[in-house]
Image (cartoon, rainbow, N blue to C red):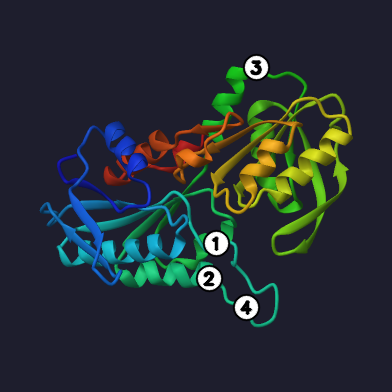
Amino acid sequence: MDRLSVITGNAHLELAQSICKYLKIGLTSCMAGRFSEGEIRVKLEDNIRGKDVFVIQPTCPPVNENLMELLILIDAIKRASAKRITAVMPYYGYARQDRKDQPRVPITAKLVANLITVAGADRVLTMDLHAGQIQGFFDIPLDHLFSVGVFVDYFQELKLKDLVVVSPDVGGIKMARAYAKRMNAGLAIVDKRRISPTATEAVHILGDIEDKNIIIVDDLISTGSSLIEAVEVLNKRGAKQIRAAIAHGVLCGSALERIESCKPLKELIISDSIPLSDDKKQPKIRVLSVAGLLGEAIKRIHNEESVSSLFD
């Protein structure tokens, strides 16, 4: 492990420190600040020549700042003669534009993949991508982790009965099925129609949810409109306790007000892939750490061991 180095920018220092604690190594000293006009200034304080370097930097809000900081960190590490550079992105920003679903729109997920590769990254480690096909946008190795194990462990401690896992849309069926299989639970789907880029309307429930304890699963929560719409429909159809397990808590706009005012929603469980600031913390929101999952993956990549066994 003396050839392993972990570096972080300003996106999520707490997660990087937790990962280093799991790995039982110190965080490599790095200065990531700003010049007087706002340009990002980076300097590595420690020697990393010939080392296997992992850069911890989720591209969460402010997305452009954190993404640019990641690219500059990778460039600095490459020029410092690191042996291998792995970009560890617990949350992969710009992932929602992963295809041309309308005329004259970009595919930003591919653009970001190109930027990371050109900057000098040798491989990428990420978690719960918005769409699985984003893995194919990279011409370098990518390891895709899933937070399902962390969430399932928490729900098994609650010992909930009559459990049904619900996907808030048709696109999330695969994730919902993974949860349902691990917890030996039922499966249901909310059929919804998108009426704008930020708003949806729930129409039907496919599956038996009456008098059941519900867990809604998804990859990210942004404004919270989709989640609250699904919760209200499930409540009207006779569901008992309703919880939500969502990997990435972006929580922008009026998301916090919606969650707090939604009485049928008992609990929102998110991972710490994105930092939750003090002003966003509330009793309904529980944060589970994925530092152990990411730390174990980093250790296995460094030791050239299998990462896929983490999915078992």
In this rendering, would 73 be left or right of 195?
A: left
Q: Position of residue 216 (x, y in %)?
A: 70, 38
Dot 4: element? loop
In this rendering, would 72 be left or right of 253?
A: left
Pointer 2 with pointer 1, Cβ within 8 A: yes
Tell which circle, 2 or 3, labels the residue nearer the N-terminal end.
Answer: 2
Residue topped by disc 1:
95
Amino acid bearing label 1: Ala
Q: Position of residue 105 (x, y in %)?
A: 62, 78
In this rendering, would 148 be left or right of 232?
A: left
Residue topped by disc 3:
159
Tell which circle, 4 or 3, labels the residue nearer the N-terminal end.
Answer: 4
Q: Real-space Cα distance between discs 1 and 3?
A: 34 Å
> Residue 256's image quarter?
top right
Tell which circle, 1 or 3, labels the residue nearer the N-terminal end.
Answer: 1
Amino acid bearing label 4: Val
Tell which circle, 4 or 1, labels the residue nearer the N-terminal end.
Answer: 1
Q: Position of residue 14 (x, y in %)?
A: 34, 40
Residue topped by disc 2:
108
Confirm whether residue 305 shows in the render: no
Label 4: how many Cα within 10 Å (few below 14, some 14–19, many 20+): few
Q: Real-space Cα distance between discs 4 and 1?
A: 14 Å
Residue topped by disc 4:
105
Q: Nearer the viewer, mark 4 or mark 3?
A: 4
Label 1: how many Cα within 10 Å (few below 14, some 14–19, many 20+): some
Q: Real-space Cα distance between discs 4 and 3?
A: 46 Å
Pointer 4 with pointer 1, Cβ within 8 A: no
The image shows residue 61, relative to residue 301, as above or below, that is: below
Q: Real-space Cα distance between discs 2 and 1?
A: 7 Å
The image shows residue 275, relative to residue 193, as above or below, that is: above
